[in-house]
Image: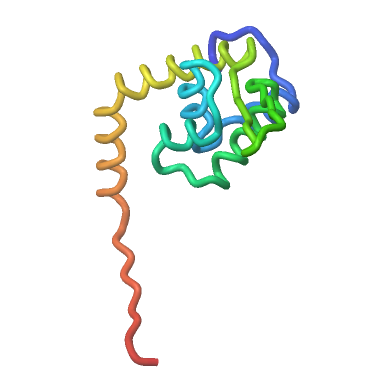
Amino acid sequence: MPGHAFQSTPSDHELLVVRPGKWTLVVISELRQGTRRFNQLRRAMGGVSQKSLTMTLRELERDGFVTRTAFATIPPRVDYALTEIGVELLHLADQWRAFALRNRDAVNEARDRFDASQPLIVIDEGDD
């Protein structure tokens, strides 16, 4: 990026490529409330599937953004919370959200212009 004095390495790119999943920033934002149980997160997030939430939480735990605490109760209870670097990621998520809201109209206009410039592809499913 112009104006930045640091050199990036392949490992820098790996971290950036792996992190942003569809639900990552939503989970991080939901955990701002403090420790949450799996089903609390799932209900709060609406359209996330159990599988997607599980995968996202595992990735966040693996990268050190979230802690997972399991309790040997019946039924089993598992709590999730942000770590110190998870809180730092939360600040980034807030900045991203502010950026997205601030630039929503410009992005929608760019998408409309792009879509209008693309040729319409018609697939003929007629007789063979």
Which sits in the foreground, 76 or 33? 76
**Which image quarter holds the C terminus?**
bottom left
Query: Which residue is found at the position 55% from the left and 36% from the top?
Result: 21
Query: Which residue is found at the position 56% from the left and 12% from the top?
Result: 87
Which sits in the foreground, 81 or 3? 81
Query: Which residue is found at the position 69% from the left and 28% from the top?
Result: 71
Image position, residue 84 (x, y; %) = 63, 10
Image position, residue 25 (x, y; %) = 49, 27
Q: Is residue 91 above or below residue 63?
A: above
Taking the image as shown, residue 6 lies to the left or right of residue 28, namely: right
Taking the image as shown, residue 27 lies to the left or right of residue 86, namely: left
Task: Please say which color scheme the image uses.
Answer: rainbow
Residue 111, quarter of the rendered image: top left
Query: Which residue is found at the position 62% from the left and 39% from the top?
Result: 75
Image position, residue 98 (x, y; %) = 36, 17
Taking the image as shown, residue 44 lies to the left or right of residue 81, namely: left
Farthest front residue?
A: 74
Which sits in the foreground, 43 or 125? 43
Image position, residue 72 (x, y; %) = 72, 32
**Which image quarter holds the N terminus?**
top right
